[in-house]
Image: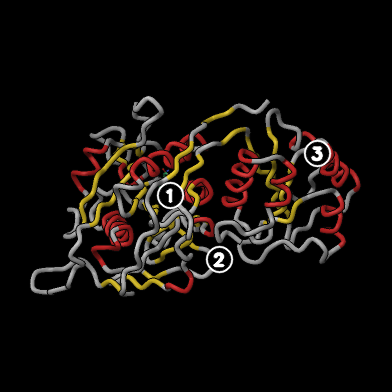
């Protein structure tokens, strides 16, 4: 039996937000610049989960010692002031009893924390106009993908950001990323378009989170979405392409922070044997697998390999095929080497990123049967494919 890691649901009483009229934001007003802010104050919840942005060397006397997450006070000491027109609340992640669970290196963030983040957003949903999640970059795209599924009928921006350098570093990227994220979440004050979805705001790009992937461990543009256009450009000013952004939903917001069981990722590699694959697809308590195949969804035609995969699907495991390539997607009928997977009962993952595939399958298996996960996996549900 899979273990339930979190069970919780919320439904909002509020209806959808209104669209602000303008497209572009030219930066925080400096003295004498005279940028007109919307009259209404906007309230943004900043959820600090950890990551480099708030890290400091573990040995204060040795700047070269490994970075560890520091507390909220450290972050706030270096954070930019809340911009005019935006009132913010800064919270840390807490568990069901209200006890703090962070800040964390994002390598330590998993499905349980996704649920806690969804719950924190849902609890503050009616009282805030937007949400900023400060998060480590390493697994930010996984968290963003998961939140896109856990938050149903989202009508407010949920903006994930972090940085390659700590906020305390001179000339780092943290303050700009933080400021841009606040500008997008605080759209009522900045006049930017409403972005009613989960996004990653990083460096000079705004990306749909469930299309994004980390592409650099060092560059200011740490993320990209090779299979979907960037939603916006960030820099001296912010340009958002409204035609690429999801429309606000007609129905009321709800959050389903219910995740059970585990999904694993298995990568094919040259020389993989059926016996090895059979063991990898038979992990205890794992109901679903994301299979990272070659090119347009291909696998070795070796009978043992196909038999191992067919055996796992016959045992009720849901196996979703995605490509190891950054661009393009799965077309299992194109080559004989892909056709075998189709016949083995593998589900087409289209152009899903590994992050979105893992999050979507985890969510589908937690909210429905294996059969419904198989049929819903290829259907676009949150602009992820
Ligand atoms: N290890 C860090 C993290 O993901 C890296 C970062 O934030 O850039 O938490």
Of circles 3 and 1, the one toward us is: 3
Q: Pinpoint residue 323: horizontal percent, then vertical percent.
A: 68, 57
Could you say which is closer to the camera, residue 329 or residue 188?
A: 188
Could you say which is closer to the camera, residue 118 or residue 254?
A: 254
Q: Is residue 16 left or right of residue 251?
A: left
Query: In the drawing, what numbered circle is on residue 226?
Result: 2
Query: In the drawing, what numbered circle is on residue 58?
Result: none
* Identity of the residue drawn at 26% across and 56% down: 175
Q: Is residue 64 left or right of residue 378?
A: left
Query: In the drawing, what numbered circle is on residue 137?
Result: 1
Q: Pinpoint residue 66: horizontal percent, then vertical percent.
A: 36, 37
Q: Are marks 3 and 1 in contact (CB under 8 Å)?
A: no
Q: CA distance from mark 3 to mark 1?
A: 33 Å
* Identity of the residue drawn at 62% across and 50% down: 357
Where is the C terminus found, in terms of image quarters? bottom right
Q: Is residue 264 left or right of residue 96?
A: right
Disc 1, SS: loop
Query: In the drawing, what numbered circle is on residue 312?
Result: 3
Q: Quadrant of ligand 1?
A: top left
Of the two numbered discs 2 and 1 on the same chain, state the one appearing first in sequence. Answer: 1
Task: Look at the numbered disc 1 and say if its residue's Cβ is closer than 8 Å to ligand 1.
Answer: yes
Q: Is residue 173 visible?
A: no
Q: Pinpoint residue 355: horizontal percent, then vertical percent.
A: 57, 50
Q: Residues within 10 Å of mark 2 (few under 14, many from 20)?
A: some
Of circles 2 and 3, the one toward us is: 3
Of the two numbered discs 3 and 1 on the same chain, state the one appearing first in sequence. Answer: 1
Task: Look at the numbered disc 3 and say if its residue's Cβ is closer than 8 Å to ligand 1.
Answer: no
* Identity of the residue drawn at 61% across and 40% down: 367
Q: Residues within 10 Å of mark 3 (few under 14, many from 20)?
A: many
């Amino acid at each position: 039996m899979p273990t339930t890691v979190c069970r919780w649901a919320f439904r909002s009483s509020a209806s959808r937000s209104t669209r602000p009229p303008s497209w572009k934001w030219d930066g925080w007003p400096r003295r004498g610049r005279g940028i007109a802010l919307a009259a209404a104050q906007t309230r943004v919840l900043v959820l600090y989960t950890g990551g480099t942005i708030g890290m400091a060397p573990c040995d204060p006397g040795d700047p070269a010692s490994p970075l560890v997450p520091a507390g909220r006070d450290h972050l706030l000491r270096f954070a930019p002031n809340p911009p005019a027109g935006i009132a913010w609340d800064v919270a840390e992640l807490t568990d069901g009893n209200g006890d703090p669970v962070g800040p964390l290196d994002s390598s330590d963030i998993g499905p349980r924390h996704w649920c806690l983040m969804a719950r924190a957003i849902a609890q503050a949903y009616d009282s805030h106009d937007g949400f900023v999640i400060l998060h480590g970059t390493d697994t930010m795209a996984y968290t963003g993908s998961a939140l896109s599924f856990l938050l149903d009928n989202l009508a407010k921006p949920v903006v994930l950001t972090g940085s390659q350098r700590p906020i305390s570093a001179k000339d780092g990227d943290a303050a700009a990323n933080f400021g841009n994220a606040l500008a997008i979440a605080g759209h009522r004050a900045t006049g930017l378009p409403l972005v009613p979805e989960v996004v990653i705001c990083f460096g000079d790009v705004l990306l749909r989170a469930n299309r994004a992937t980390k592409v650099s461990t060092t560059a200011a543009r740490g993320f990209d979405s090779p299979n979907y256009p960037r939603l916006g450009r960030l820099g001296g000013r912010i340009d958002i392409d409204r035609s690429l952004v999801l429309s606000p939903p007609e129905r009321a917001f709800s959050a389903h922070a219910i995740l059970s069981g585990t999904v694993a990722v298995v990568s094919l590699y040259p020389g993989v044997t059926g016996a090895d694959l059979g063991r990898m697809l038979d992990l205890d308590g794992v109901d679903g697998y994301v299979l990272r195949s070659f090119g347009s969804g291909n696998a070795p035609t070796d009978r043992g390999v196909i038999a191992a995969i067919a055996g796992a699907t016959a045992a009720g495991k849901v196996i979703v095929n995605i490509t190891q390539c950054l661009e393009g997607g799965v077309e299992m009928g194109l080559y004989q080497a892909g056709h075998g997977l189709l016949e083995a009962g593998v589900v087409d993952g289209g152009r899903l990123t590994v992050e979105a595939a893992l999050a979507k399958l985890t969510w589908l298996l937690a909210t429905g049967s294996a059969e419904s996960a198989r049929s819903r996996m290829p259907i676009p549900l949150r602009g992820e494919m």
